């Protein structure tokens, strides 16, 4: 079988990683990686090079990034993405194409495949994030896809509800748990060598994205977050940058301005899979509105302060504390930090064998 894998960002590539390794190692499959979105953006770290550094070849690459972060630019980018992918789909032959998650560019790539009757396999369907337009795209991709690999049983049941059928719907757990169980993460000393950030200093890992259904409030949201952090002196702040969403550049500018006047603030565009998970492991807590605060953080588990509504609808595990994006509430949440002790973490998202389970399904496809 010729298997295509759609990857548009550092985030989905990190999740795919165990599956990509399994596909590469099995001579029954020909793997063709299709890179687009922020992978080809210098501003976002030109992360296509990370794919190649990991030993994978990128068979197809498409420039699809919006010119800026306005809704109009993103809409135009979606149209351009569909147009560019129509040429790819008409000239390449795939037995199955993997797609992951809920991004607008992933939606556009998948939507353009429909007239070509290309079979899609969707990872991370059935989830809810009502504070982001991604929620709409995720469920739309579910309807386009033939095969479905969910991260938890409640999400499998939602996909069945959406599709009206249990055919080809599998709860395999999260590939992120495979990563966490298999990867050798950096020690604090190795992390400092690679990124010049000392995690022996008590640190907060911060990833904050725009709320794309509340665009008019995002300037207030980032100002409240940074105002709260400016009153917290006992921690080091490690920022990773937002996705290429509407108003993402505004948030990026505010973070950089904050870091320029805040000695304990460190900004990294992209850690890569090992770097990001290592930072998560060694930091005291996470603050923000990223999906990694739900799945990956549950593994350690790590105390997470989930801000606002971007991830509203996801399963809340005991390590997550949700609060409004208001200065005083954020300060109080940080001060309520508690150490969570667990030898095994949360098993809601599987046992670390998601890639094996997906491969078993693929090997049964005629």
Image (tube, rainbow, N blue to C red):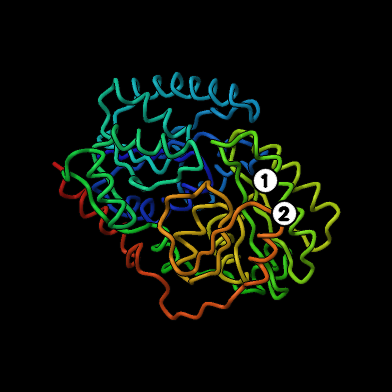
Give above or below for 331 relative to 103.
below
Task: Name the secondary structure under disc 2.
Answer: strand
Question: Which residue does the image show at 29% across and 55% down from the upper left?
Answer: 154
Label disc, if present, on residue 267 of the rendered structure: 2
Tell me the quarter of the image containing the C terminus.
top left
Q: Nearer the viewer, mark 2 or mark 1?
A: 1
Q: Nearer the viewer, residue 110 or 28?
A: 110
- Reply above or below: 127 against 146: below
Q: How many numbered marks, from 0 up?
A: 2
Neighbor class of circle 2 (other Cα within 10 Å; few <14, some 14-19, many 20+) is: some
Residue 276: name its quadrant: bottom right
List x then y, in percent, for residue 117: 25, 25
Q: Quadrant of residue 145?
A: top left
Q: Nearer the viewer, residue 227 or 177?
A: 227
Left or right: 31 with respect to 160? right
Whether residue 49 is visible: yes
Query: Looking at the image, is 227 positioned above or below residue 252?
Result: below
Quarter holding the N terminus is top left
Provide residue 120's location: percent of width, then percent of height.
Answer: 29, 36
Disc on the earlier residue, 2 or 1: 1
- The foreground one among 153 and 147 is 153
The kind of secondary structure element at disc 1 is: helix
Q: Quadrant of residue 63?
A: top right
**Do the numbered discs 2 and 1 sit on residues whose CB atoms are within 8 Å?**
no
Q: What's the distance in space between the residues labelled 2 and 1, CA to CA?
A: 19 Å
Q: Which residue is mark 1?
A: 221
Report x, y in % for residue 99.
Answer: 37, 40
């Amino acid at each position: 079988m010729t298997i295509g894998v759609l990857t548009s960002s550092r985030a989905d590539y990190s999740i795919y990683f165990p599956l990509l390794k399994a596909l590469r190692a099995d001579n029954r499959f020909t793997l063709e990686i299709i890179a687009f979105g922020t992978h080809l953006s210098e501003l976002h770290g030109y992360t296509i090079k990370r794919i190649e550094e990991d030993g994978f070849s990128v068979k197809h690459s498409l420039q699809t990034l919006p010119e800026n972060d306005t809704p109009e630019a993103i809409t135009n980018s979606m149209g351009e993405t569909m147009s560019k992918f129509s040429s790819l789909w008409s000239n390449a032959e795939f037995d199955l194409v993997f797609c992951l998650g809920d991004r607008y560019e992933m939606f556009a790539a998948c939507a353009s495949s429909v007239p070509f009757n290309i079979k899609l396999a969707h990872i991370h369907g059935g989830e809810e994030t009502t504070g982001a337009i991604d929620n709409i795209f995720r469920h739309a991709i579910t309807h386009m896809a033939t095969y479905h690999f969910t991260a938890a049983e409640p999400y499998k049941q939602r996909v069945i509800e959406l599709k009206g059928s249990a055919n080809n719907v599998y709860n395999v757990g999260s590939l992120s748990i495979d990563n966490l169980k298999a990867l050798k993460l950096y020690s604090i000393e190795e992390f400092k060598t690679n990124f010049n950030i000392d995690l022996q200093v008590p640190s907060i890992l911060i990833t904050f994205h725009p709320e794309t259904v509340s665009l008019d409030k995002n300037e207030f949201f980032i100002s409240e977050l940074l105002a709260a952090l400016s009153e917290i002196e006992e921690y080091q702040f490690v920022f990773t940058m937002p996705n290429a969403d509407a108003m993402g550049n505004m948030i990026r500018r505010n973070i950089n301005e904050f870091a320029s006047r805040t000695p304990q603030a460190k900004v990294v565009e992209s850690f890569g899979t090992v770097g990001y998970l290592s930072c998560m492991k060694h930091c005291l807590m996470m603050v923000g509105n990223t999906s990694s605060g739900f799945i990956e953080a549950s593994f350690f588990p790590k105390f997470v302060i989930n801000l606002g509504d971007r991830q509203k609808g996801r399963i809340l595990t005991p390590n997550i504390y949700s609060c409004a994006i208001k200065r005083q509430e954020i300060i109080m949440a940080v001060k309520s930090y508690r150490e969570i002790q667990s030898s095994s973490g949360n098993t809601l998202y599987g046992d670390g064998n998601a890639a094996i389970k997906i491969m078993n399904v693929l090997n049964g496809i005629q």
